[in-house]
């Protein structure tokens, strides 16, 4: 049993959007949700899921049809984030959709030959793509990256390390940020390259995590990895803008995922409150519990409304770009704080049962922090927003 949903607003979601939502919701309920506990305990999920997601039309949304994509706008991607969150497992959506952060720079700035080599096989679910930006010594400070790519003839020689890389263990294509101008500092001289998973000199180590257990997360080390110059994405030394644009997209959809997970916590808490009786009364009949549930709903509605309005502005190119960047950053903070609050309150309502592995809220509680840190930490987001707004 769950709270009734508000009807979709016509100026945000068309009948085509809602048909896609219904199809995706059915797919998640059938192919993912029943298995997330087992996959979490196994710390993996089947490779076959990539193919299933591709076959139902989820993986290629927003990518060019020429390369196996399907037409879609910002709201199709918002639906993807919201509906995948319904399974209650961030680990599944993180690795299953790692191509949504690994492929966009290629789709935007890669050569036609590079697009043809990478995109079709990933969008069909036959290959896995990942993005490798973060380094052990840099964290959210992308401009401080130390991995180098020195050109030698028709190849770059790549040396360095990346860490916390989603799908890093199983990825066939890894879009990596490197410093191609070793005499430069900061954002200057940074490029993007596509490194293939079987490249000699690539070493991968799995990382153990607090949450997202079924998502493989890797530490990558590059020792004289030879990457063809043809695998350069965009212009040499000018990759930083591509990275930042990619982050803005990622942050918006992380915000949608976050309030989606918060909704899962609310629904589980409400279910429990209606069924659980103490001292002859259902928990849901107690004012203190009802207030907790309404506090959760208010935060979810606020985050959802903010993201939908932002998506509308982005889709219709309304507003100053710097203002939109600031509000995307703020939306990520708002939504992940809602997720944190709702996960905490859900566990409080569930009591001892909420502390047991197997409840959706317990899993989401463990996954809150990666959402507040990944894609740009809360502190970085607030500072970025302040700079963009001239504060």
Image (tube, grey):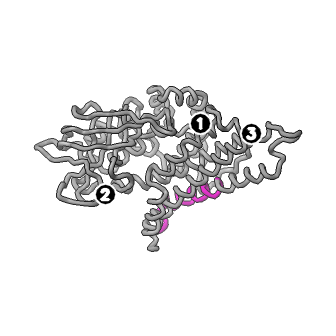
Which is more toward the observer, 351 or 59? Answer: 351
Using the rendered view, name the quadrant where residue 98 is placed. top left
Percent x, y for residue 248? 43, 56
- Identity of the residue drawn at 49% across and 65% down: 318
Residue at the outermost left position: 153
Regarding mark 1 in the picture, which secondary structure is present there? loop
- Identity of the residue drawn at 45% across and 29% down: 51
Q: Which residue is mark 1?
A: 87
Q: Which residue is mark 3?
A: 271
The reply to whether the magenta stretch includes residue 290 is no
Q: Which residue is mark 2?
A: 143
Percent x, y for residue 192? 28, 49
Relative to 347, 231 lies left or right: left
Relative to 230, 88 lies left or right: right
> In the rendered structure, which segment of residues is drawn in magenta?
300-319
Between the C-alphas of marks 1 and 3, the distance is 16 Å
């Amino acid at each position: 049993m769950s709270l009734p949903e508000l009807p979709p607003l016509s100026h945000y979601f068309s009948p085509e959007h809602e048909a896609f939502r219904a199809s995706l919701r059915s797919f998640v309920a059938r192919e993912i949700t029943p298995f997330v506990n087992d996959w979490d305990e196994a710390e993996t999920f089947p490779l076959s899921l990539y193919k299933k997601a591709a076959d139902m039309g989820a993986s290629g949304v927003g990518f060019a049809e020429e390369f196996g994509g399907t037409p879609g706008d910002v709201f199709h991607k918002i639906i993807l984030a919201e509906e995948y969150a319904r399974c209650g497992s961030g680990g599944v959506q993180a690795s299953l959709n790692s191509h949504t952060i690994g492929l966009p720079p290629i789709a935007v700035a890669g050569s036609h030959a590079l697009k043809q080599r990478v995109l079709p096989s990933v969008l069909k679910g036959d290959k896995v793509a990942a993005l490798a930006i973060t380094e052990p010594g840099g964290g959210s400070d992308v401009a401080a990256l130390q991995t180098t790519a020195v050109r030698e003839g028709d190849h770059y020689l790549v040396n360095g390390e990346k860490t916390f890389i989603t799908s890093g263990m199983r990825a066939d294509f890894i879009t990596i940020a490197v410093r191609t101008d070793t005499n430069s500092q900061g954002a200057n001289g940074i490029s993007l390259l596509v490194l293939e998973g079987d490249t000699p000199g690539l070493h991968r180590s799995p990382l153990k995590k607090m949450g997202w257990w079924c998502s493989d997360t890797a530490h990558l080390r590059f020792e004289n990895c030879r990457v063809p110059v043809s695998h350069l994405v965009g212009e040499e030394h000018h990759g930083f803008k591509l990275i930042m644009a990619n982050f803005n997209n990622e942050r918006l959809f992380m915000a949608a995922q976050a309030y989606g997970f918060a909704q899962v916590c609310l629904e589980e808490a409400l279910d429990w409150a209606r069924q659980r009786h103490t001292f002859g009364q259902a928990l849901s009949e107690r004012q203190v519990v009802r207030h907790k549930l309404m506090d959760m709903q208010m935060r979810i509605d606020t985050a959802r409304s903010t993201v939908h309005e932002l998506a509308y502005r982005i889709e219709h190119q309304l507003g100053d770009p710097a203002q939109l960047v600031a509000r995307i950053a703020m939306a990520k903070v708002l939504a992940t704080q809602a997720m944190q609050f709702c996960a905490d309150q859900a566990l409080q309502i569930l009591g001892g049962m909420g502390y047991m592995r197997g409840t959706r809220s317990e899993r989401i509680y463990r996954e809150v922090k990666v959402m507040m840190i990944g894609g740009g930490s809360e502190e970085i987001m607030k500072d970025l927003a302040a700079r963009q707004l001239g504060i």
